[in-house]
Image: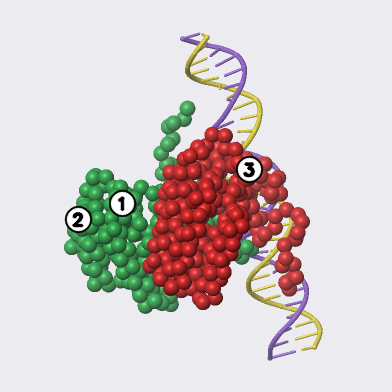
Chain colours: A green, B red, C yellow, D purple
Amino acid sequence: MDIVKTATPPAGPIRRETLHQGAVAELRAMILSGELRPGSRVPEVQLCEQLGVSRTPLREALRVLAAEGLVELRPHRGAVVTPIDPTEITAVFEVMEALEALAGDLACQRGTVEEFAELDRLHDQLHAQFDAGDRLAYFLTNRQIHARIVAMARNPSLEATYAGFASKILRARSLANYDEERWRHSLSEHDGFMAAVRQRDAATAGALLAAHSRQTADAVLAALNGCGSDDPGNVGRQTASL
Amino acid sequence: MDIVKTATPPAGPIRRETLHQGAVAELRAMILSGELRPGSRVPEVQLCEQLGVSRTPLREALRVLAAEGLVELRPHRGAVVTPIDPTEITAVFEVMEALEALAGDLACQRGTVEEFAELDRLHDQLHAQFDAGDRLAYFLTNRQIHARIVAMARNPSLEATYAGFASKILRARSLANYDEERWRHSLSEHDGFMAAVRQRDAATAGALLAAHSRQTADAVLAALNGCGSDDPGNVGRQTASL
DNA sequence: AATCGCCATATTGTATACAATCTGGCACGC
DNA sequence: GCGTGCCAGATTGTATACAATATGGCGATT
């Protein structure tokens, strides 16, 4: 058989598994990174040549992204990247809070010793990156920590739902970079729930994670409402919010 | 302009908005009602003539349903209706519990007087249907009540997520019809959280709704594990579980 | 006799062609 | 002058045709 060409051809158009799957991944990345600006129309043919695929798989990809809520389809009027609506983000954060609480609770009950150790390691790394003033690295480690906690909950449905909400929040965050004080506070919140996590105190960990999420929400929403949407200067560049 | 033909043509194939949207709705209904059995393969061409559409919109519909988790796509091997996996249902219920709690909490804070009154009316109706022994009617009213509560939470993201989880649970329920005692207990749980709702006691209402969800989970999972999956006699008929 | 490899068939993945619908502008009429 | 109706262009929605891949059976080989 041909078990040879398992690796991705470095050049050429996308070739993940099927074209429409690859297109979904590509488009999602483009949306989350801000390369496709919120509210912008998405002409099919243009994306087709950009991704090197035909309209059929591209359209299938758009339908999937629409089901995820990243784009909106208006019959005969084309697709638009879902605009970032502070009202919606508020709603998303409300649910996120509950999901974080659940994840923290379950993670404490179900994580392995190795996973807890890994969490500790990441937390130390987070501190180091804060001390170094490396916002981007901090941001990435932060996401990793939360992702690990969710994974430790041993609940694929929670994980998938969490990922969906996280992606929406990520898009909002890319518009709003906030201040040093919030950063410091964010770290101290991490210290807080990590203390509970170390003791396997499920209820407290969940509550503190939810509180952390709520604080993040406040900061993001404040930044969102603060900067408005006129002349979105750095939109399109993913910035490191905390 | 042509504001005339707003109504759906009664005859002819599906014609909701676009064909693929209609196909999504049709297929989802077929899956939820059990007309398409869990685990069964879904040949495209067969569904095409059944729905009276071409392969293109049907395939787009399948991609959407795959994103919702109702079908699974295996490249070059066709789509299958996602089998009902007790493990997954357990996970789904875990998240559902948190969603119910959140919905109940927010609903108490945000519902209008009219909505609370409507909830009361539905609750009375539920009692009447229990007394009449009408399981199906009870089941439908039950769903309505929960849907109303979620709507009162004023959170579209929660509503959408809830709907997704509810549909998965619905499929599991259709396999497991459980006993009179559980029915009675379910009603008394409704009495419980409705009492809290009437007092706008958000925290208690949320907690009781979560508990109700947990009890439902126990019953459904017990029934699921009880009957096994050999000779799934009445699979395909939607039954009224509580 | 059992296993491996190959091939015919069916089904899915993709590309292209055609039909339907929306947008923007222009001429006409009031 | 302004609004209305119509038309050309562009874009999306759908159908069909072609290419690629998985499945199951048959035969050759050991």
Query: In this figure, which residue is indicated by the disc labeled 1?
Result: A107
Which residue is at 48% across, 47% downward?
B220
SS at circle 1: helix
Residue B65, image x and y in percent? 55, 51
> Do circles 1 and 2 both sit on a common chain?
yes
Residue B237, image x and y in percent? 62, 45
Query: In this figure, which residue is indicated by the disc labeled 3?
Result: B44
Q: Which chain carries label 1?
A: A
> Which of label 1 and label 2 is nearer to you?
1
CA distance separating discs 1 and 2? 19 Å
Question: Height in image: B142 above or below B37?
Answer: below
Query: In this figure, which residue is indicated by the disc labeled 2?
Result: A124
Which residue is at 73% across, 53% downward?
B13
| Residue A26 in view of the camera | no
Amino acid type shown at disc 2: Asp
Amino acid type shown at disc 3: Glu
Which residue is at 30% across, 62% downward?
A207
CA distance separating discs 3 and 1? 41 Å
Residue A179, image x and y in percent? 27, 72
Which residue is at 21% across, 61% downward?
A191
Q: Locate the C terminus of chain A by quadrant.
A: bottom left
- Is A216 placed left or right of A65 in the picture? left
Residue A74, image x and y in percent? 59, 64
> Do circles 3 and 1 both sit on a common chain?
no
Q: Which chain carries label 3?
A: B
CA distance separating discs 3 and 2? 52 Å
